[in-house]
Amino acid sequence: MNAIEVENISKRYGQFFAVDNLSFQVPEASVYGLLGPNGAGKTTTIRMIMNVLIPDKGRIRVLGEKMSEAMKTRIGYLPEERGLYPKMKVGELLVFLANLKDFRGPQAKEAIDSWLDRFDLLEWKEKKVEELSRGMQQKVQFIATVIHKPELIILDEPFSGLDPVNTKLLKDIMLEMRDQGVTIIFSTHRMEQVEMICDNICLINKAQSVLKGNLDQIKREYGKNMVILEYEGDSRQVKQYPGTETIDDYGKYMEIKLKDQADPQELLASLAGKIRVDRFEIKEPTLNAIFIEKVGEKNE
């Protein structure tokens, strides 16, 4: 069963399409990535799912029905524009926001303390929100999103403002929730986050879907013609090899896509004695490579 069904939705402002005939389905108890470059239409799509914006055409079903105000107690929503009351104390704010979701009393206060402790914020409970760093405020907003134990969580750029330690913590929490049967959909333009946690994806570019489906299957369909190379020496020795299709060079690390008939072993043999090869790995293409290829094609 699907937690979200989006069918042929569009949203236009004048002659500009923010979203153009978009369709996808989010299976229950999964993590779904809504991907794309900045301005692709991700946030507009999320706002239409949440009924903040109304599609010009198409249909959206959430948890088996049309979105309504009553349903919002079953959903946790972290918008792109963060909205905390800066003069309120952290603990008081979380109690207030939990009450708005009909989560009250000692149970709510116990859950708030538990979440604050997990995010290493318990000592900040009596501090005003404005005294917290941006990353701390992001963690408080995430707690407010999940405090009422929603069935469906919708997160717009949830890792924004978080350092690597807290990014990992949030990733672990999202996977725990998925394993408990919660459905999570989140938007991002950072591919490494998606490969860590997503079961399925929809890649949007210029308001339209350009790739969607199961992440593992998508990567398999792109074949094993990707080589990861860590090296020391002149990168031109690699770039001159005729069997390469694209190269993403980071200085001492390369992601190389070979042409369909090219043999990776021939590439390795051609480098012998020319550069130092510290790592040579044949693998499925990274999502980042797929993203660049698909978005690049669309932009052309």
Image (cartoon, helix red, strand yellow):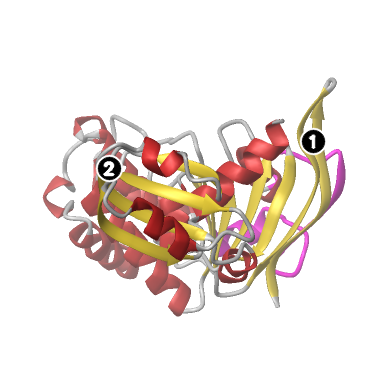
**Looking at the image, which residue sits at the far top?**
14
Would you say residue 87 sits in the magenta stretch?
no
Q: Which structural element holds mark 1?
A: strand
Residue on which disc 2 sits = 252
Highlighted magenta segment, given as a residue range: 51-76
Q: Residue at x 73, y 48 (%)?
A: 209
Q: How many marks?
A: 2
Label 1 sits on what residue type? Lys
Q: Residue at x 74, y 70 (%)?
A: 64
- Percent coordinates x, y for residue 144 in the rendering: 39, 52
- Percent coordinates x, y for residue 185 in the rendering: 56, 58
User: Of marks 1 and 2, which one's residue comes earlier in the chain?
Assistant: 1
Badge 2 local density, few (<14 within 10 Å), some, or many (20+)? some
Q: Residue at x 33, y 43 (%)?
A: 138
Residue 58 seen in the figure? yes
Q: Quadrant of residue 111?
A: bottom left
Q: Quadrant of the C terminus?
A: top right
Q: Which structural element holds mark 2?
A: loop
Q: Quadrant of residue 248?
A: top left
Q: Which mark is residue 11?
A: 1
**Looking at the image, which residue sits at the far left?**
123
- Percent coordinates x, y for residue 256 in the rendering: 47, 50
- Of residue 121 and residue 41, the one placed in the foreground of this image is 41
Badge 1 local density, few (<14 within 10 Å), some, or many (20+)? many
Label 2 sits on what residue type? Lys
Q: Is residue 270 left or right of residue 4?
A: left
